[in-house]
Structure formats: C-alpha cells, structure tokens
Image (cartoon, coloured by chain):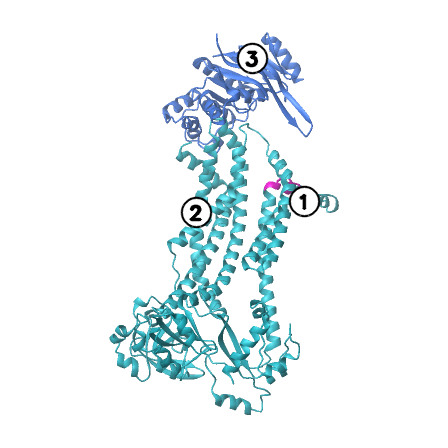
Chain colours: A cyan, B blue
Amino acid sequence: MTLSTFIKFNIRYYRRHRMLSLLCIMGIALGVGIVVAVELINGSAIGSFSAYVDLLSGRATHSIISAHSHIDENLFSRIWKHPQIKSASPLIEVLANVVEASEPIRFIGVDPFLDGATRNWGRNELDKASLTEFLSAKPPAVLLTNRFMTAHGFKTGDILTVLTAGIEKKIQVIGVLPASIGIEDNLALIDIAAAQEIFGRAGRLDRIEIIVQGDPELLRKDLPVDLKLTDASSRKSILQAMLHSFQLNLAAMSLLALFVGVFLIYNFSMFSVLSRRQDISLLLTLGSDRRELVRAFIAESLIMGIVGSLIGIVFGYLMARLSIDKVSSTITDLYFYVNVQSIRLTAPILLTGMGVGFTATLIGIAIPALEIAYTPAIIGMKRQSIEDKAHGIKGLLFISGLICFLAALLSAWCSKFSIFWGFASAFGMTLAFAFFTPSILSPFTYYLGIFSKWVLHSVEGYLAACTIRASLSRTSIAVAALAVALSMTIGVDTMIHSFRESVAAWLYGSLQGDLYVAPTTTKWDHPLPQSLIKTLNKDPRIQDVERYSTYEIYLEDKPVRLRVLDSPVLRRHSNFHFIIGGEGAWDKLQKGGVFISESLGYHLAWAWEITLSCLRRKASDLFP
Amino acid sequence: MDSLIRLDRVTKRFHSGLSSEICPLNSISLDIIQGEKIILLGKSGSGKTTFLNLVGGVDVPTSGDIFFDGRKISSMSHRELAQYRRKEVGFIFQAFNVFSTLSVGENLMLPLEFLGISEEDRARDILASVGLKGQWHKFPEQLSGGEQQRLAIARALVKSPRVILADEPTGNLDLETGNSILELIHQICEDRNATLIMVTHSSEALWLADRIFRLRSGKLIEEHAKDEAYMCETSDSI
C-alpha cells in the first residue's frame, strides 16, 4: 500500500469515527499535558530557586550560618581574620512588602566592599550606580531587577515604601541590577547597614559567605558552637531534597493521569483494530504482508500520538502558566521563597512530552498490534472469537491483579523507608483493580441482565447488560479507565480532606486566639513593637495575649522551625494531644523543655534524648 | 499436461468446543491444470470455503500437501504465502469485500500497489472491461450490488493472477445480474487462460465448468455430468 493510499485509508476511517479519534487524541493530550505542566512547573521552580542560591553563593565555597537563625555581627571580624579564610562577605536576606508594588520582594543586604570577591554585583556594578549614593543615600538606596521595575513602572529616583513589622520605611531606587546576575525575580540589593536598620536587625547577620583557602575542618573547629560551616553545594542539595518530595507528588499525579490516558489509547486502538478486522483480513488475503500491516498500524497510532502529544504540550504549557503562581506560593509556604516569573518550554521538556506521548501510545497499542499480528487472513472470522479469548484470560488477569495487590501491600509497608514505595503502592493498587475489572464486570453484568429482565422487565436493560458482557475485551478497559480516573479523584479528595482535618485539629489544639497580630513582611523575622504588646496587655477587652516568635534553626543539618512562646498562656488555652510525655510535659516545657511535632519525631526516628537535649540547649542559648 | 494446482491427501480438522472435532476435508487429492474451470458444490458447512482458503494460501492443512506450479505452498512461510497470494491468486467473495473508505480507483490499484506496479491505465482498462468505465472516482457505497461485485472481480483480475478463487460470487445478486457476472468471469478466464475454482450453490453457474466436484462428508466427489450435478444440487437444496 502506498503512503498516499494508506493516509487516505486511515483519514477516512478516522473521519467516520470522529468522536473516538478525538477521545484517543485527548487521552494522549491529557497525559502528556499534565506531565509537561509538572515538568515545566518543577523545572521553573528549581530553576528559579537554583539561580537564586547560585547568586547568593556566588564564588563562595562555604557559608557560615547560625544554628538559631542569626549571627552576632561582632563575630564577623574574628571570622574574617581567620587564616583559613581568603575572603568573607556578611549577608542579610529579608522578604518584605513594597507597598507601591503590592507584592513581596527579597532584599539582599551586602557590604559592597567585601562582597565583590564573592558575587558578580560587586563594586564594578555599584560604581555605575554610584557607590557613595548606595552607601549613604537618604532614604536608603536600593538596586532593583529590571523585571520588577518594569512590571510596576518604577524608575530611578523613585521613593518606595517598605512595610516592616507594621512600620513604614522609605527606600530610594538608584538603579537597575545588571541582567548578568541571571535573576528576573523580585530582588532588591541594599547596603547591609541600611538593611539592618530598616528591618530591625541591628547587630545581627543572617549568613557569612566565605571563600576558604585552607582546610575547612580547621575553620570548623574554631567556630563558636552555635555556628555551622556548610559548603555551598550541600546546602543547595539539602534544600533541593526538601523540594524533591513535593515534586515527586506532582510527578506521581501526572503519571496517574497518563495511566488513564493509556487506557483511552488502548480502548480506541482496540476498537479501531476490531472494527477493521474484516479489512485487515481482506488486506492479508490480497497479499499484504502481516508485518507491513502491523507497521502501518503502529505508524498511524504514532501519528495520533504525535498529534496528541503536540496538543498535550500546548495544553501543558497553558496549564503551567495558569498554575505557576499557586505552585510558587505553595512552595513558598511549605519550604522556601521562590518567585517564578516565567516558564520556559525548553527542548528537553519538549522531548520529554513527545517521549511520554510516544511511550504511552506504544503501551496502549501493544495488545491491539498483537491482535493484528495474529488476525487470520480468513475472511469472516467472528469477533466473538476475540471475546472468547477475553473471557478466557479473565482468570489470568484476576491472578495478575492479585499479584499486583500483594505487591502493592508490600510496597505500602516499604513506604516507611522511602516515599517512592508509597507511590509504587498506589500504582500497584490501581493496576490491581484494573486487572480485577473483567472478573468483576462479567458476573456483575450477567446478574444485572437477569435483574433487568425478570425484576425490571426491561428488555433494553437486559440487552445492554448482555452487550457489555459480550464485548468484555473493550468494555472492561473502559470501566477500568473510568475506575482509575474516579479513584484518583476520590483519593486526592480524601487526601485533601485529611489534610484539612489535620489542619483543623491543629488549629483547634494549638491556636485558641480570637485575633492574630503579625507583621506583614517576612513571616517570622520581624519582632512586633514592644509598645504594641504593652497596649494589648492593657486593653480590658483582651483576656490573654500570647506572644510567640518563630526561628529557623538547624537540626542534623536540616532546617527546623522553632517556635518560642508564653507557655502558661498556651497551656491555659490549648488542647494538645501528646503521643509521648502526657500532661507532665507542660511542666517540663516551662523548665526549658521543648515539644516536637509528630512528623519531626518520625523524621528524627524518635531519637528523643539527642533531639530534646539538642533543642533544649539551643533554646536556652537563645533565651537564657 | 502438468497440473498447476495439486492437492495430495489434504486433511483439515477444526476443534469445535473442548472435545469435539470436525473434519471438513479428509484426505483429498486433486490435480487442476492451467486454464481449467472447476466448480465446487456442497451443503453449507461442507468445507467448500475451507478448500478455497487452503488453495489460496490463507489457511494451512492439518496434514497433506498442496502444490502450486510445483512449489509446496503448505509449507511456505508467512512472507512466502503473502507473496503467493499477492502474485498468483485473485479472490472474489460473496460479500464483495471492497474497501468502503477507498474509491473505486483506489480499490483497484491496491493489488497493483502490493506488487509495486503503478500502471493506472491497466486498472482503467480492466474497469472498462467489467462495465464500470467512468466510475473511477466513485465510492463503493455509490455503486449497486452488481457494480460492487464487478469491482471485486476487476480487483481480483487486475494483477493477472493465474488462479481465481470465487466464493459464491453471485450469492448476493439477483438472477439477471448474477448471470451477467458469471458470463464476465467466464469471459475473462477464457481471455487470460486463468484457472478458476468457484464455489457456488447456483445451478445457473454449472455451464461454465470444465469439471464439477461435490464435497460430502469430507470427501471430494467428481460429478460426471452437468445434469447429474444439477439434480444433486437441487436435491441438496431441498
């Protein structure tokens, strides 16, 4: 068959079965679209995050951070003079709101004299924007990214308002950050002294970026006990590892969508093969080679796959564009600040989309292609023979389902070792129930037919049930696809409901306040003014005021949030359920102990003594 | 004269259900020469179509051998069988079996395309010879039943096969159209010296046969006179 005849042959067939063709293409597009969207979102989030970490780290080989959030500024000169350090640059990093922009922006406070050795925006760039102005302008000077300025119509010389802990501070735009820094996010560069003043961090540093010239271990030994030396790459990889589980969740969801897509592809392909079985037999009788027919079928399916994949890529891109803000804010809420301004459809993502579409298509058409390979040339072989086969293998499928089910249970047990096994379990379970479908559907439709005929007296119902049972090769796949889609929806909904329940329980147990007063800037970094606390305490309409602050500390090299609070107030109003410790834990808390969450307990494998003593010591260091 | 087709103790068995077995062809031997026209009679389910399938290389015998021009087709590979069907065999079916998604011209060009031939004139000539001149661009559903069968005959003949296997070609046609189709098949076979094996229930077709056979209980019985065959055919029908 020549290519033109082959194309005509198929185009006319697909034109006659428009809805089915559309469904198949949409099946591929759905799977590819979600995979591409997740890839785009993950890639953009990682890209944004990595660019930012790279920018901050610059040429620094290591960072010095505090185990309890801030470094005493007085330590800097001692560290800087250490013989193992070639250069050091102090840094302040704050997320704050710019009133005129109505969106958060990250302020990076640097010492321009010391920072040049570490980062690209050193003295050269600042010379252009006038170093003197940068250091001494009133109000304090900032350099902004071009994107942020363009987006909000800011220009050099504009005076902007920063809202910090309920207090408005003014800043002055003196220039644009060079594009060479590789970041388009909301970023402002400010002198470190000005940052300390504006953000209430006098005498404190967030981090010291250093270039080590000798043995880092010697430096590590000499550091005060509450300071940690981390190398630039390990810090990035720890943060990336945190993001990994979030991305794995998204990837698993996209794979489930792909799973449904494969079912749709299979169903359409099987239908197209079965409905053209007569034609296939006829072509074989006329002398067509069986391999040519299989090749032609695979080619036509792959053309569908290409069309579906291309639509899926466009669909995925649009979906990513629409959801990137939500995902960014979720990552920011859960892990760390990311601000993805754009998503880029790169060649690897395009190839991934096409590859996924091709693979899904090949999996979906594998059995129909085999059907062609074994279709006899004898014209008129009845379709029933295929259904006989389908009925014949339903026992085998049931056993396969049972194996998948047991494997899924085993994976579920293994999920405590790695989240991967949790997802493997979900997939195994889905596959198991897909395999069970023919065995369940066949007797179900049999009794449904009897019920329709004898109880409902519905001949139409009886015929419908019989037809479903008679076409088990296709109907069971359609039912399995629907079941997977439905189970996915119910599963995700249950998961979200469960999260909500957990949050509700946590709110009920820990937050008893009627009103909450918090700074509008960085979530926990800004102390509220003391005068406000005093005013609130004196107000006769207020029964209790519970103060709390949250700090990011490091525990076994992983960031942990430490909340410091008025324990007597909390005790009066909270409704905690202790897994370990009981009511006596409240007394221990007042004596310097800490409570840890269940999830942190699991994370640290319930290493109680170490964890608690470590936390207790650090907490007492912070608040003697 | 050397035989073109030779069946040597050919048996075909089918499984029906788990235990029962049917044997429509039981140790059949037959020699057919080039240009001979054979008519095969028999009741429904007697194995007539199975016989055609075996000779046409779309099915394989359970035992025995089938030779075509000295080549053993019963032991050919799938690819060799495809080549054999492509070059040597033209099929005509009761249900026409033309591709509804292809035009008349495309249907006709299909066997030539399998052979790598792109001579449209050849296809147009054969189309004219079956009385369908000017119908090249039409689709099968725009043709009558008789015209569709003419198209099927044209498709079977366009590649000039040495053997034509016709399975009740007039079964779906009225008497007048059926007769015109039979005359057409006869004429073309005469013109091209093609061997014809035709399965039919119609006594109207017996006149074109050189030899007539009947399949009964798995055995092939030659009828010695057309009248005798006609009488048996009539009694079979009853």
Q: Residue at x 63, y 36 (%)?
A: A388
User: Which chain's residue wears label 1?
Assistant: A
* Vertical placement of residue A264 versus A385, above or below: below
**Mark 3 residue element:** strand
Q: Which residue is mark 1?
A: A445
Q: Secondary structure at mark 2?
A: helix
Q: Residue A478, image x and y in percent? A: 58, 46
Q: Is residue A431 visible?
A: yes
Q: CA distance from mark 1 to mark 2?
A: 36 Å
Residue B149: percent from left, percent from top: 50, 24
Q: Is residue A491 above or below residue A369?
A: below
Three-letter amino acid code of the residue under disc 1 = Thr
Closer to us: mark 3 or mark 2? 3
Where is A329 relative to A75, above or below? above
The chain ID associated with circle 2 is A
Sequence order check, earlier mark of 1 and 2: 2
Name of the residue lying farthest toward the right: A455
Q: Mark 2 is on which residue type?
A: Val
- Label 1 element class: helix
Say left or right for A208 vs A554: left
The picture quadrant where one finds residue B135 is top left
CA separation in Å, label 3 and label 2:
54 Å
Q: Position of residue A210 (x, y in %)?
A: 36, 73
Query: What secondary structure prevails in the magenta region?
Result: helix
Magenta stretch: give its range. Answer: A465-473
Name the residue tied to disc 2. A307
Q: Which residue is mark 3?
A: B30
Under mark 3, the amino acid is Leu
Say if the magenta span includes residue A404.
no
Residue A153 or residue A398, whichever sits in front: A398
- Identify the mark at residue A322; answer none if there is no mark: none
Frontmost residue, B75 versus A113: A113
